[in-house]
Image (tube, rainbow, N blue to C red):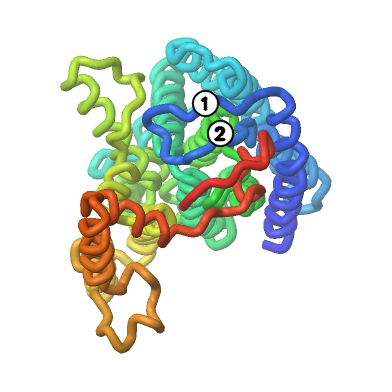
Amino acid sequence: MREYLLTLCVTAAVTYLLTGPVRKFAIAAGAMPEIRARDVHREPTPRLGGIAMFGGLCAGLLVADHLASLNGVFELSNEPRALLSGAAVIWLIGVLDDKFEIDALIKLGGQFIAAGVMVMQGLTVLYLPIPGVGSVSLTDWQGNLLTVALVVITINAVNFVDGLDGLAAGMVCIATAAFFLYAYRMWFRYGIEEAAPATLFAAILMGMCLGFLPHNMHPARIFMGDSGSMLIGLVLAAGAISITGQVDPDALKLFVGGERNATHAMLPVFIPLLLPLTIIAIPFADLILAIVRRTWQGKSPFAADRGHLHHRLLEIGHSHSRAVLIMYFWSALIAFGMVAYSVAKESMWFVLLIVALSALGLLLLLLPRFTPRAPRWMEAFVPPRYRRRRTQVVASSRAASADGRTAREAGDESDEGDRDPVPAGVNGATAVGPRSRFN
């Protein structure tokens, strides 16, 4: 565990330290596209954050290769080299897209190539554990096809959810933390060496996300771009694929009845590995809804819009930070709930806890519709959004009508007077000029 934590910390430190120089490079290279209709930020912000994340990935693998306990992963398995090769391909395509906005079909082809590179080096699904049947061996083309499909779907699911400051990196970090607990449990408790590469990939991916988050939280100074979102999606899928089909159900020694009974009993544990989209269920649901919505409207599935889940949270009335935290909450509930269910699936208290947390999540979703208003004598001690502004607007409208102005103009002026200008230097786009913006 100490070596895994050391690898995580080195990866996070390298990613964090590289992000600042990468931001300056992105500004100098002009990787700051204009604001699009679907964007929620208000000023052009530099991209190419994936360069720093790829540097953290390389540093994590390099450090792990020189550690005593983790060195065996590189000697006994070719999966770390397969991951690095596929990550280099998808990272290069993402960098080109962040700078030149390449076509969506070209990006999709690059994703297939990156997945194929990993498959050619041995990172593939070997068999599927099916309840009531046992372990079903896959042919080479079946395993390769399933591997490519899982990689491409996971990459696009993470890419689709990358719409708010800190959202994609935080959700992937939460999902990876849950996956790390599962993989480490398989490796440490049951002594299954095949789980070691997946545990290493999870530790490195957590370091990449944690190192980038301080620069990406609202207001973001830099975006990860497609070079970062596709990279972390590929690493997440690679970790799940590296352990799927490698764990022998009989090696878990849960039942003496044979492989079939063991596979049936361990199904809740195998599901997150067979389908990594179960761990990142929120991005996957967003992906499916986006494809259905765009196809129903007669548009291309790759056409961007403002109908994603995080956009709808903003439309309900949530602030930027609260929308991100709500998505964090649901991601953690699903990811850690799945891992906890695989450990204590027969405990009734666990089911009650999940129900209670789900009810809390629904309450948080509806919170803007039930915004409380503080009494007048407490208005000086609460945030401005809980104060009563009606009397101020009415008074200003009466004064405006006396001056020949409309009440709407007076209300607009009163709203503008309540907003304080944010000084230059808060957001990444202020590197272009010293202009201020409003909240």
Q: Position of residue 268 (x, y in %)?
A: 32, 52
Query: Residue 225, how many percent across, how many down?
Result: 55, 32
Q: Which residue is at 74% across, 52% downward?
A: 13
Q: Which of the two residues, 190 or 50, is positioned nearer the viewer here?
A: 50
Q: From what the image shows, is residue 436 above or below residue 234?
A: below
- Amino acid tagged 1: Glu
Label 1 vs 2, first from the N-terminus: 1
* 43 w.r.t. 17: above or below: above
> Which one is in front, 185 or 39?
39
Q: Spot the residue most to the left.
A: 296
Residue at screen point 30% across, 74% down: 387
Residue 412 percent across, percent down from the top left: 31, 52
Element type at mark 1? loop
Left/right placement of residue 401 relative to residue 98 reads left
Q: Residue furthest bottom?
A: 377
Residue at 29% x, 49% y: name it. Answer: 313
Mark 1 and mark 2 residues within 8 Å of each other at the beta carbon: yes
Q: Which mark is residue 44?
A: 2
The residue nearer to you, when weighing 133 against 376, is: 376
Give left or right: position of 28 versus 171.
Answer: right
Q: Residue at x 37, y 60 (%)?
A: 329
The amino acid type found where label 2 is placed reads Pro
Distance, label 1 to label 2, CA atoms, is: 6 Å
Q: Secondary structure at mark 2?
A: loop
* Quarter where residue 317 is shown: bottom left
- The residue at which mark 1 appears reads as 34
Q: In the drawing, does residue 280 fall left or right of residue 130? A: right
Question: Is residue 75 among the parts visible in the rendering?
Answer: no
Whether residue 412 is visible here, answered yes or no, is yes
> Callout 1 environment at 10 Å: few (<14), some (14 to 19), or many (20+)?
few
